[in-house]
Amino acid sequence: MKTVHTLADLRALLTAAPSAPVFVPTMGNLHEGHLDLIRQARAISDSAAIQGSPVVASIFVNRLQFGPNEDFDRYPRTLARDAELLAGAGCDILFAPDEAELYPEPQGYKVVPPPELADILEGAFRPGFFTGVCTVVHKLFNIVQPRAAVFGKKDYQQLMVIRNMVRQMGLPIDIVGGETMRSAEGLALSSRNGYLSDAERAEALTLIRLLRGVQTELRASERLTPELLQRCEESAMAELRQRGWAPDYVMVRRQKDLHHATADELAVGLASTPLVTLVAAKLGATRLIDNLEV
């Protein structure tokens, strides 16, 4: 694996490549979930249709997507360890620019996603977050020019925002969603899990338990209604508060656009209107997110 830190060095490597790369953008502090995305990218690269495409990963902690009271400064920077992990997972090129390289001047031009998707759920609690995400991802897409890019489904709303951006901007990139990797107990792998104490890590399993409970109840229900979905949401929120969490939301939404399903859609059933339950809550000082399709 080759590691480069400048746009010029990256472009020199990509110009010599036999075909366009498969790309996995990250903020580093990698875990097994990230490495699974790299392995998926490797499988795409090795497929007969586009054999020879290099697998490119980026590591860049993007200031634009952090709010003023979020953890930008304490987000772990573990480049040497991350590079070893990426090489072992099948990455060909690591692009690890610093801020001056990726943002050599103030980023006045930004990609602002539509509010009907970007200002709900995560966007409602983290104003400007998806503008920061879209701006850096679009910029990285312009730099790397991949034929495919792999993103994890743990960040469900982010994956949808990026897919919609690529479609509306006419970018020739296939966006692949990688399934959420979990611990043996069910905890969704996340870089922020490293902030949890042992006791908090055990308590964090409450999220997947609640998500599975909602999934089971809705799948078993003879008649889905908006009122039933609301009761599921409120019950999960109440339990999180009882257990000492500070929940931002537990929402059951349509998979296709993350909006509320109508009574008519629910009456037809899950087969025609697939749902997803999304949760975000703070445990101690650590904010965790998760989701589970119904």
Image (cartoon, rainbow, N blue to C red):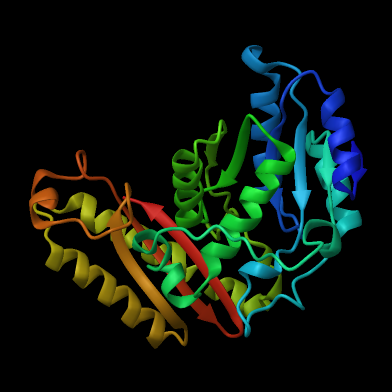
Q: Quadrant of residue 149?
A: top right
The x, y position of residue 227, in whole percent, is 13, 68
Residue 36 at least partly seen: no
The x, y position of residue 189, in whole percent, is 61, 57
The x, y position of residue 178, in whole percent, is 55, 41
| Viewer-nearest residue: 283 or 175 | 175
| Viewer-nearest residue: 23 or 244 | 23
Residue at image position (63%, 29%) is 147
Residue 256 at least partly seen: yes
Residue at image position (76%, 38%) is 56
The x, y position of residue 221, in whole percent, is 15, 54
| Viewer-nearest residue: 211 or 142 | 142
Left or right: residue 193 compared with residue 10: left
Q: How many marks?
A: 0
Q: Quadrant of the N terminus?
A: top right
Q: Is residue 62 above or below residue 37?
A: below
Residue at image position (8%, 49%) is 267
Left or right: residue 126 compared with residue 259: right
Q: Is residue 151 above or below residue 145?
A: below
Residue at image position (74%, 63%) is 61
Left or right: residue 238 compared with residue 138: left
Left or right: residue 56 compared with residue 212: right
